[in-house]
Image (tube, coloured by chain):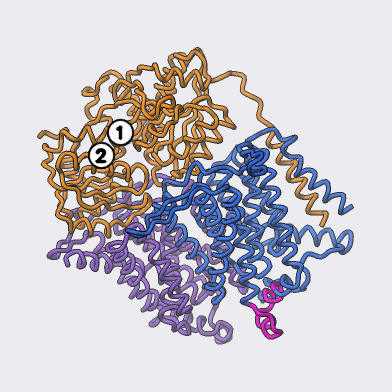
Amino acid sequence: MKTALLCLWLAVLLTVPLWLTDLYFLHILITTGIFTIAAMSLNLLLGFTGQLSLGHVAFFGIGAYTSALLSLGFDLQLTESYRFAVAPKPVWLAFLAGIVVAGFFGWVIGRISFKVRGAYFVIVTISFAEVVRLVALNWVDLTEGPMALSAIPPFTFGIPGLWEETIYKKQPNYYLVLGVAILSYLVIRRLVLSRVGRAMIALRENEPLATSVGIDVTRYLILAAVVSAAIAGAAGGLYAHYVRIIDPDIFLFIYTVTMVIMVITGGKGTLAGPIVGGLIFGILPVVLRSFAGPEIQWIIYGAFMILIVFFLPDGIVPAIRSWWEGRVGPLAEPEPAELSNARPAERQAE
Amino acid sequence: MSHWIKAVALTLSAVALAAVPQIASAQETIKIGVNQPLTGAVAASGNYVTNGARIAADELNANGGILGQQVELIIEDNKSNPTEAVAAAEKLIVRDEVPVMMGAWSSTYTLAVMPKLMEYEIPMVVETSSSGKITTQGNPWVFRISPTSEMEAKAFADKIDDFGIKKADFLAVNNDWGLGASDEFRTMLKENGVEVGMVETMSADAQDLSAQLSKLKASDADTLFVTTAVEQLTLVLKQAKSLGLPQTIITTGGSQSPDQLIDQAGAAADGSYHLLFFAPWFPEAAPNPEVAVQFVDKWKERGYNFAGLTEGFRGYDGIMTIAAAIEKAGEAEPEAIREALWDVKVEGVNGDISFIKQGPEGMESGQNVPAVYVVKIENGEIIQPSF
Amino acid sequence: MDQLLQHLLNTLILGGTYALLGIGLTLIFGIMKVVNFTHGELYAFGAYMMFFFAMVLGLDFFATLVIAVILGVALGALIEITLLRPLRGANIDTTMLVMIGAWIVMQNTEQLVWSGIAKSINTPFPVEPLVLGPVSVSWVRVFVFVVAVLLILGAQLLIHRTKLGKAMRATFQDRDTAALMGVNINFVYTATFALGSGLAAAAGALLGPVFVVTPTMGNLAALKAFAIVILGGLGNIKGATIGGFILAFVEEMGAGYVSSGYRDAMGFLLIIIVLLFKPTGLFARAERIG
């Protein structure tokens, strides 16, 4: 039954471009997919390690800018005598470099910000994203600043030298995003179900206890930050080469908030949560657009966020699961979040 | 694991239903896409341009439409952001299937949208943007009715002596328009033997400019050229006044709306000069006085803000140019409209509109040569400066 | 030299309003352990109320200022009672999410009500600036500075000299003990949040006429308030006051002598540097408010 449904689900996803002929809607699905990948990566930090990282969009943007800049090439006069020029690189290479650079920044920010917790951590991560935005805005020689990086080449597909196809059309872009999404899902699943994942969850539930039994807290947090940042960077790269224009507004706090809403609505600390949340909040704007302006849409988002925290603090996925279990009995394979009994909100509540 | 799959499948199918295309309305209309900043940093200007476009569309429809069909403006907000401008263009082209567009106010938004014109082969009339790059990079789908910064600078050249400029500084918004304009004016001034000093920049949403202005105050230049949208210009004038800046301020770009400056900056606007492309206080002095006067009357009739006229005329001229092209083409198809745009001759509010070729051969963009005016604010009044 | 003097004067004037922005936020964090993401929206709310009463209804400028602050206090109390009171005792991340939600709702409501077009507020002050030798400053900014300093001093007095202030300090030190000693914790929390909100609204009402009023004006204000509070140490009012002046100094000098484009980045770089070397802020006396 379970396998059958999984196959059905995959079949639906794989055949979407065949039965969905409306290009505009396919466009929405592609951007939804990209933001879902970013939400999945945020979930690794927010859900599994319990760190409310609110600068996540920085990694998304760094991935996007790195990939775009390398594929376009750039020429920087750093000092009078020193010039740093990069010829345009193939898109795939640029995309991989974007992932690596985003991951590197994840490491750096991990080193800096995991020294502090709680409100300080939140503010450091927000500040980081804001600094990156201002650099992108003002380093005009490199990033074109507010003029935006445009005419970013799309992905190419094929065997170099023999046969190459440039992906302008929406259908192949859809499959590309879907592929990266599935790969990211598998990486995250692998990570959280491993020993590393158990250590992360242990320190989310009780950091002092985790430290006392010999878990190297900072190391695991940094590992999570690197993987999370790298996946967010991949999402950013996909975005840059799909939309083919990026500007410093890509670093706005509101996009981090979108990812956070996706994660907490779906269910933080569950593998399926960000996917459910991502689909809901990726597609909701289209449904709302016909009768409401963007302001209304955002008001609904904000209200959603408050309502979820009040009435469904664990998100949709755990809620459905417990309803299902109440009727049918326990599931064969527990989600990692259920490996421990207490949830942080309950533990700290009075 | 299976229940969520079900939930998602349900969501997806619900949404798929929502995505079924709506039944087309019985009455066929000619759609024109309008891509303007209706919210965000430069929203005021975008709304004025859109109002001008509405006047043009209503006037066309009152006179029987184009080719016997009613004109329908599809207005999309680009939120004062280049990426959103592209998203708006994508929506207009793919979703609404417009055969022609007008947009996108700022040079930055227009430049961002331009690859989409190539990709989908849709012509666009550019009503405000002034960056030289727009018509010189080889995009045959672009037709611009507004002047380039270079044209504006050249038009100013014979006024240098009137102003008695010896040395000039610049304060510009850090985008294609601001940086482009200060480049062109710098080149023009140098060619005319005027010394050029500092170039200070500001981001489009900056509100406290006292640091930049304090720096400029210490300069020995006699004139300060400012290029930015009217909202920020108000702040520049107010803060320059409070810091006691000695320089004469001249604003460029035609997006200044002196009335709004007087209204919002008060006496701080006194003594400043403004380069404009339409002077609604003296419509009789325009090249096509009848068109200008009736446009100003319609604008007032609708209760639109008079201050917006210096921007609003662009929307009117843009839509009228598109209408003339569709009429000439005989059909509302992108390629035919593009062809026809080369031959249009429109009596616009700014002046006569027609396109000359610019850019690499075979890939030329269309460029109109519009009129440029200088006005001065004195004791809260707009006057034509006498030298 | 003249340029330096002008920059220093700008710093002083700007610092006063930054300090006002910072103390409201730090007060709420110190006593309630809530990171108030709606701070910037209360700032924008103050500015819009100013616009509404002074420009739309045509009331007196100074009366409007008082009305805007009172409404800010009322809105703060409303937020506290409806959103934060039910979450009493929840962890800090939970309340942060709720406050982010509230922030989004508030900002977009402003956008809906007032549209995205910037609004300008006229003041009764003369346009001719106050000239002090080589430097000058507009009268409205002098007024803003004086009121800001008075409000900061008033807040200090309230905390140190009144019964409510005593209850606030007791709650800050140990909430449970304070409750046992008969302090009405709910009242203290509501009062704290309302006071912090009132200060934010006051900052908006004061600066609205200096700049222009837009729905997104709160974003940068909130980020700057965060920077100021981090500099001074979360929950430290004196620290926030000094932090406000430091931020103004760094921004003004950075823009004047390094690069005007990086003006706003200076503050955030400062935060990251401070947190690297002294994570609890420059004035780490977080054990006591005031």
- In this rendered view, identify the residue nearer to me: C220 or C260: C260
Q: Circles 2 and 1: CB distance less than 8 Å?
A: yes
Chain bearing tag 1 is B
Chain B shown in which color?
orange
Q: Nearer the viewer, residue C137 or C1?
A: C1
Residue drawn at (40%, 58%) of the image: C46
Q: What is the chain identity of the residue bearing mark 2? A: B
Q: Position of residue B309 (x, y in %)?
A: 31, 32
Mark number, residue B258: 2
- Provide the letter of the chain coloured purple: C
B287 left or right of A306 in image: left
Q: What's drawn in magenta, residue-wise?
A: A200-217
- Confirm whether residue B109 shows in the render: yes
Q: In this picture, is A328 found above or below C20? A: above
**Residue A11: quarter of image:** top right
Q: Which residue is mark 1?
A: B310
Disc count in the image? 2
Q: Looking at the image, can residue C105 be seen? A: no
Prevailing secondary structure of the magenta residues: helix
Asked if the stretch drawn in magenta spans residue A208, the answer is yes
